[in-house]
Image (spheres, helix red, strand yellow):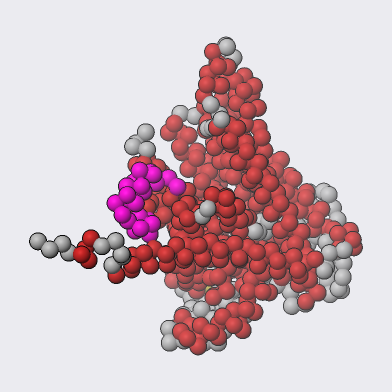
């Protein structure tokens, strides 16, 4: 019996070579896809930074918008407006979100907990413009726009984000801690307030910051609820107030290049805020989760 | 006990909110629903002067942009997920993963601004003519490329969907048991054969759910799409034409609605969008939950 030299040879035959080639090709394509995503991020950030930086000035931040048809002016009312709207939305969404998360992780029977999680996920999946129209129908028709109505719409967007993030963190709190507190004779609510919440506070806060970053850039809920006519700088949420994302939306549709410059500058302000806060929150969240998981 | 009741009430409030949203949207849309009925869905045109409204153009625009964006985004997302879970060196892995997630953090209005002023002109003067020259025989690339239109909307939606689906894919791929992967490699499979033979079949259902979630995101995006799509009318096959989607129509006409029936008709569009996105999200969540159930052996 002659040994088939080709069959046992260590040099690759054409079939092996083809398999290896396909392998290298596919690895190359996967790497390329990841690089492309990073490149798009870089291109968007660089575009915004380049075009936005030149329009930034002291006046830009401190003056209010010029009346229609005149150039110049700043964005003070949009800055203040965004601050008020988002702060108020946070004040509405965070307590409620934490309570819902506590119910899911500490009190609810498993089936109900599943149902609440499903409701939160579906709420999170609703298009934000639908939320805007809902608040428009509920609060705006008949009585007009106001800052707090925009906040209410943003709060609906933040609620599932805060609740889900908090609930996932609470699930990481070791049950030995809970059992320890209960064994010492603490009641259910003492255990929750004294042990569970303090242990997870850091992670809950970072989850909240991520929700704030998301809400700060959301435009669709504000179109119908908060922003159409508002020229003066106002801290009062019972008036209509301008906001940064709304102003970018309006300026970007204008044919005037000067408006585009201001849209870029506002875009730079918004993107810096959003990227810095979400990056920091993400890094901190990883740290907190590691400590919780031990 | 008190805390139990308080948190329970908060959870009930979240459920009530979801119901209230559905009820209120249909409530405002009611005049249009009773006037036009279901024929609204299959009628073309949006004529504010004669108060004749139909949703078909917008449903077509929504379907075309979202489906195409998903067709482009799905292979890219799977590739990114594979790169991050299997290929990337440990050091850069977390960095690239967080950069991809940052792409999802860019506000849609900023992406739309970039879309209309940077991407649009690029499509109008470079990408569009190139596609038309080489692929013009396909009806999709027929016509004259413009700075705003369906193609730009598809690209912007792709950029929005990729970070979401790719991070879900990455988690799914990381969840594949190492024994299975190592078994395939030990049998002499190349890395790609291991991916094709083990990872992809194992995670198929989950990837499907990720794609559906991405679809839900794409059909609901109002702001960025209305900035770049050009607010056109009619049903066109060409990607160079302008168009509108359900969501972008809502964002585009937010202050233009003059009559009550026009407002009701706009909200009818919102009701259609609401029903589609509820179904899409529910389907994705059911798949995700079943998938998790299966993998943990039902516990």
Whole-percent x and y of residue A15? 28, 67
Please identify the quadrant where the C terminus of chain B is shown: top left
Q: Can you say whether A65 is above or below B291 in the image? A: below
Whole-percent x and y of residue A290? 58, 35
Foreground residue, A144 or A47? A47
Whole-percent x and y of residue B159? 56, 64
Q: Can you say whether B285 is above or below B34 in the image? A: above
- In the rendered image, which quarter is residue B197 located in? bottom left
For this view, does B231 lie left or right of residue B75? right
Foreground residue, A150 or B177? B177
- Tell me which residue sits at (36%, 47%) in the image: B182
Note whether residue A126 is visible. Answer: no
| Main SS of residues in magenta | helix
Note whether residue A266 is visible. Answer: yes
Whole-percent x and y of residue B143? 52, 87
- Tell me which residue sits at (29%, 70%) in the image: A14
- Tell me which residue sits at (56%, 30%) in the image: A294
Most extreme residue toward the front is A2
- Tell me which residue sits at (84%, 64%) in the image: A56
For this view, does B72 lie left or right of residue B250? left
Foreground residue, B226 or B142? B142
Q: Can you say whether B157 is above or below B91 in the image? A: below
Counting every numbered tag in the picture gives 0
The stretch drawn in magenta includes residue B178 = yes
For this view, does A35 lie left or right of residue B213? right
Q: Which residues are magenta?
A: B174-195
Please identify the quadrant where the N terminus of chain B is shown: top right
């Amino acid at each position: 019996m002659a040994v088939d030299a080709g069959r046992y040879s260590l040099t690759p035959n054409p079939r092996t070579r083809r398999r290896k080639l396909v392998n290298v090709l596919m690895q190359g394509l996967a790497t390329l896809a990841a690089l492309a995503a990073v490149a798009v991020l870089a291109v968007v950030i660089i575009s915004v930074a380049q075009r936005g930086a030149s329009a930034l000035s002291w006046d830009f931040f401190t003056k209010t918008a010029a009346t229609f048809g005149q150039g110049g002016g700043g964005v003070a009312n949009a800055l203040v407006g965004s601050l008020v709207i988002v702060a108020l939305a946070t004040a509405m969404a965070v307590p409620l979100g934490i309570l819902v998360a506590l119910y899911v992780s500490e009190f609810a029977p498993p089936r109900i907990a599943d149902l609440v999680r499903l409701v939160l996920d579906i709420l999170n999946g609703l298009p934000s413009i639908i939320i805007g129209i809902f608040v428009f129908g509920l609060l705006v028709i008949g009585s007009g726009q106001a800052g707090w109505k925009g906040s209410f719409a943003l709060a609906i967007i933040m609620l599932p984000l805060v609740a889900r993030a908090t609930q996932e963190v609470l699930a990481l709190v070791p049950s030995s801690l809970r059992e320890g507190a209960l064994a010492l004779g603490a009641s259910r609510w003492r255990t929750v307030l004294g042990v569970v919440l303090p242990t997870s506070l850091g992670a809950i806060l970072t989850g909240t910051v991520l929700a704030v970053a998301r809400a700060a850039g959301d435009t669709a809920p504000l179109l119908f609820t908060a922003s159409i006519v508002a020229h003066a700088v106002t801290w009062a949420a019972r008036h209509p107030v301008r906001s940064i994302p709304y102003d970018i939306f309006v300026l970007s549709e204008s044919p005037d290049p000067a408006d585009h410059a201001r849209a870029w500058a506002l875009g730079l302000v918004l993107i810096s805020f959003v990227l810095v806060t979400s990056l920091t929150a993400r890094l901190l969240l990883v740290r907190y989760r590691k400590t919780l998981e031990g | 006990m008190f805390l139990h009741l308080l948190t329970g009430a908060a959870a009930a409030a979240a459920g009530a909110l979801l119901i209230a949203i559905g009820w209120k949207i249909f409530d405002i849309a009611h005049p249009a629903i009773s006037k036009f009925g279901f024929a609204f869905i299959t009628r073309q045109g949006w004529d504010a002067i004669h108060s004749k409204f139909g949703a078909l153009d917008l449903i077509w625009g929504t379907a075309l942009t979202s489906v195409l964006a998903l067709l482009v985004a799905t292979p890219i997302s799977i590739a990114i997920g594979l790169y991050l879970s299997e290929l990337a060196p440990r050091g850069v892995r977390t960095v690239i993963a967080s950069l991809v997630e940052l792409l999802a953090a860019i506000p849609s209005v900023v992406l739309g601004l970039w879309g209309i002023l940077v991407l649009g002109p690029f499509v109008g003067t470079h990408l569009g003519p190139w596609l038309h020259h080489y692929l013009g025989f396909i009806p999709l690339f027929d016509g004259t490329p413009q700075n705003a239109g369906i193609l730009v909307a598809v690209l912007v939606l792709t950029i929005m969907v990729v970070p979401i689906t790719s991070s879900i894919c990455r988690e799914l791929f990381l969840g594949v048991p190492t024994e299975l992967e190592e078994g395939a490699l030990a049998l002499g499979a190349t890395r790609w054969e291991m991916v094709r033979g083990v990872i992809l079949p194992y995670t198929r259902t989950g990837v499907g759910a990720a794609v559906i979630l991405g679809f839900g995101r794409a059909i609901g995006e109002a702001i960025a799409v209305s900035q770049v799509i050009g607010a056109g009318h009619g049903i066109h096959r060409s990607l160079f034409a302008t168009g509108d989607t359900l969501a972008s129509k809502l964002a585009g006409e937010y202050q233009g609605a003059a009559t009550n029936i026009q407002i009701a008709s706009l909200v009818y569009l919102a009701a259609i969008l609401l029903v589609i996105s509820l179904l899409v999200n529910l389907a994705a969540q059911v798949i995700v939950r079943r998938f998790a159930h299966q993998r943990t052996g039902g516990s």
